[in-house]
Amino acid sequence: MRRHLAPLMFTALAAVASAQSFECSPPNVALPIGSTADCENARWNGEGPFAGVVNVADCGMPAAGSQYARLVASGPLSASHPAGTLPARPLPLGVAEIRLDAPAGATTVSLRYNFLNQEALWGPPAAGFNDGMEIALCDSVTGARIQSLAYADTFSAIPASPCGSVYDGSVDTLAVGADTLTFNFGAPLPAGLHLSIACWNTFDDDFDSSVVVDCVTWGNSWEVGFLSGPRVQNVTTGGPGFVIGSNTSVQTRGGFPFIEGYHCMVAQLWDGNIAQQFGGIAGDYWICTDRPFIVLSEGLLTGGVNPGRGPTVNFTLPLAAYGSFCGRGIVIQSYIITELITNPSFTTALFGWFR
């Protein structure tokens, strides 16, 4: 296949935000503070003892890979905080927060998380010492809450045989080990939103609880490049496609009914955490040389019943493969060799995020 792929070019005309598997950040180093984001597109507001990536196995974390994000509580949120009450947004000063930009166009988000309750070591829950955490979709300018996605506090259920955190003995909450969040927004997200992970103390900053997060994956797919030209197209019927356990159908489309030429459609894992492209005269070329790719279809695009179209390719990833897609998706690219006069635009790719 190299003889076909080597000379081909690819252009990307849209920015695609990365998912977060927390494998690229150095462990035990605090996240950048303020507007600067790290290689995981993560940043900390600087409140609390620590926010960063760690690699110590703890109460179901990491969910996949060897690392995950940890945020230690800070406050005080208030003098008293009733059970199950969402914090004010924008967050009060002093509350610890990690922000991850939400990619425009995403329709779902999924992640693994765990709230580790430090106050449970000192007695029954009380509103005056009600540590907690919330994961929410928020406006990046105002900090206002758009949608609350997950919440837990010291009143949340503790499993019959809870895990104790290796960091400080904090007690596992909700389910045993990591909990799973999956949320469908119902429509593609606009630009200018972020995922907020907040963790607070109430009344004082003694006995800090914490929240850990892994495998943040934004669901949907993006086409990039000139959509009127050659492209990969998601042609899944009866569903959105790019969903673990469900069928996905993709197809190379030449862009013009009379287009002819050799095509090759390939798929490869993509996590967006490192530069997985290199430049070409027509733009960036997304085959990552250190990772294997799968040829989905190849051959000539000619006339016939569906001129300018390659065969429809169907695939389904089993639920057992979910861990392999922790914070990652698939980039599917199609390359077409033809005359410039009939094909003035370049090849495009489809980024699919499994959830």
Image: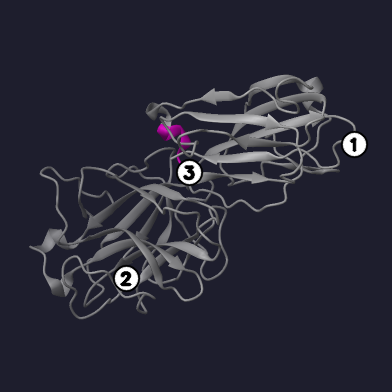
* Residue at disc 3, secondary structure: loop
Residue 343 image offset from top left, x and y in percent: 85, 37
Task: Using residue 64 as the reference point, say whether residue 270 is left or right of it.
Answer: right
Mark 1 neighbour class, 10 Å CA radius: few under 14, some 14 to 19, many 20 or more: few
Residue found at x 14% / y 61%: 155
Estimate the spatial distance between the alpha carbons at disc 1 and disc 2, rounded to whole Å: 59 Å
Q: Secondary structure at mark 2?
A: loop
Q: Mark 1 against mark 3, which lies toward the viewer?
A: 1
Quarter-wise, where is residue 280 in the image? Answer: top right
Q: Give the Cα distance between marks 1 and 3.
A: 38 Å
Residues at marks 2 and 3, CA–CA distance in whole angstroms? 27 Å
Would you say residue 69 sits in the magenta stretch? no
* Name of the residue lying farthest toward the left: 124
Residue type, label 2: Ser
Task: Please identify, in this view, whether the residue under mark 1 or under mark 2 is nearer the observer.
Answer: 1
Query: Where in the figure is residue 39, as x and y percent of width and height?
Result: 57, 53
Residue 340 disc label: 1
Q: Which residue is mark 3?
A: 327
**Residue 268 horizontal/vertical position (percent):** 61, 31
